[in-house]
């Protein structure tokens, strides 16, 4: 696969170290409990699989896929569920695992939607956070890195479905492939 002309923002080594720390923090917070990870497809798959292996508590995983309704979504914040969870989350401790929080609209909607299914608790872990782009007040419970307003790829994040397999997280300096 050809590498995009990109600069490394976060190296595989930096990511691995931070994900390990996040796993330790989450394991401490949920000590004595069983946790259900909800991996938001597709971007969070690599983060979720690494995070899951860094947890020392009993853990299960399920998957959800969401898509925006198109151009309107950026203002409405309504997202469509393309693939729903396989199981009920009622009474469970749930951690939504996402790749990046940008405007906050997707996770805000997803968290509210899942809250209506009456989990015992619900929190959000994101690997990346771009707070400067927020359109709604959304604060993830666990965040790996705060990054500047660049479009990034790698470690699960794509551009037109490509570059998810890069080990590092990269950005194109002038954003010319957005
Ligand atoms: P939000 O609803 O917070 O604006 O957007 C969340 C989604 O937008 C993410 O799950 C991701 O799919 C996409 N997204 C936002 N910023 C980036 C980025 O820098 N790179 C990539 N590949 N996707 C992004």
Image (cartoon, rainbow, N blue to C red):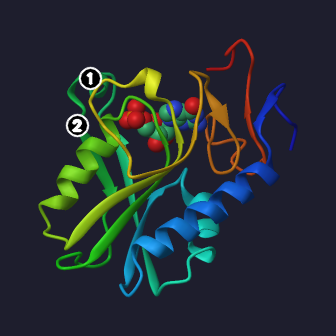
- Residue at point 56% right, 21% down? 149
N-term mark: 1 or 2: 1
Say if residue 16 shows up in the picture: yes
What quarter of the picture does the N terminus occupy?
Answer: top right
Secondary structure state at the residue bearing disc 1 = loop
Q: Which picture quadrant has residue 32?
A: bottom left
Tell me residue 102's x, y (percent).
Answer: 44, 32
What quarter of the picture does the C terminus occupy?
Answer: top right
Whether label 1 lies within 8 Å of ligand 1 gets the answer no
For residue 170, side relative to residue 160 (left or right): right
Query: Which of the labelled discs sits on residue 78, or is there none?
Result: 2
Say if residue 167 shows up in the picture: no
Vertical order, 161 against 148 (above or below): below
Q: Which picture quadrant has residue 118?
A: bottom left
Secondary structure state at the residue bearing disc 2 = loop
Foreground pick, 68 / 92 = 92
Q: How many numbered discs sit on the rendered protein?
A: 2
For residue 50, side relative to residue 89 (left or right): right
Whether label 2 lies within 8 Å of ligand 1 gets the answer no
Residue extending farthest right = 2
Mark 1–mark 2 contact, CB under 8 Å?
Answer: yes
Vertical order, 82 against 52 (above or below): above
- Residue at point 37% right, 25% down? 134
Tell me residue 116's x, y (percent).
Answer: 11, 60
- Residue at point 61% right, 23% down? 150
For residue 90, side relative to residue 18 (left or right): left
Vertical order, 145 against 178 (above or below): below
Query: Which of the labelled discs sits on residue 72, or is there none?
Result: 1
Foreground pick, 12 / 160 = 12
Foreground pick, 162 / 127 = 127
């Amino acid at each position: 696969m050809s590498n995009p002309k990109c600069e490394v923002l976060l190296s595989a080594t930096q990511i691995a170290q931070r994900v390990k720390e996040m796993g330790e923090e989450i394991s401490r917070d949920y000590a004595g409990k069983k946790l259900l990870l909800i991996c938001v497809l597709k971007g969070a798959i690599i983060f979720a699989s690494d995070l899951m292996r860094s947890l020392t508590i009993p853990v299960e995983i399920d998957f959800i896929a969401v898509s925006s309704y198109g151009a309107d979504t950026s203002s409405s914040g309504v997202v469509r569920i393309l693939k729903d969870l396989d199981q009920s989350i009622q009474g469970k401790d749930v951690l939504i695992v996402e790749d990046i929080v940008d405007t906050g609209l997707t996770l805000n909607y997803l968290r509210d939607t899942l809250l209506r299914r009456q989990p015992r608790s619900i929190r959000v872990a994101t690997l990346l956070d771009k707070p400067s782009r927020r359109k709604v007040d959304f604060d993830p419970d666990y965040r790996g890195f705060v990054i500047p307003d660049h479009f990034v790829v790698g470690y699960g994040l794509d551009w037109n479905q490509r570059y998810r397999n890069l080990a590092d997280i990269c950005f194109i300096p002038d954003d010319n492939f957005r």
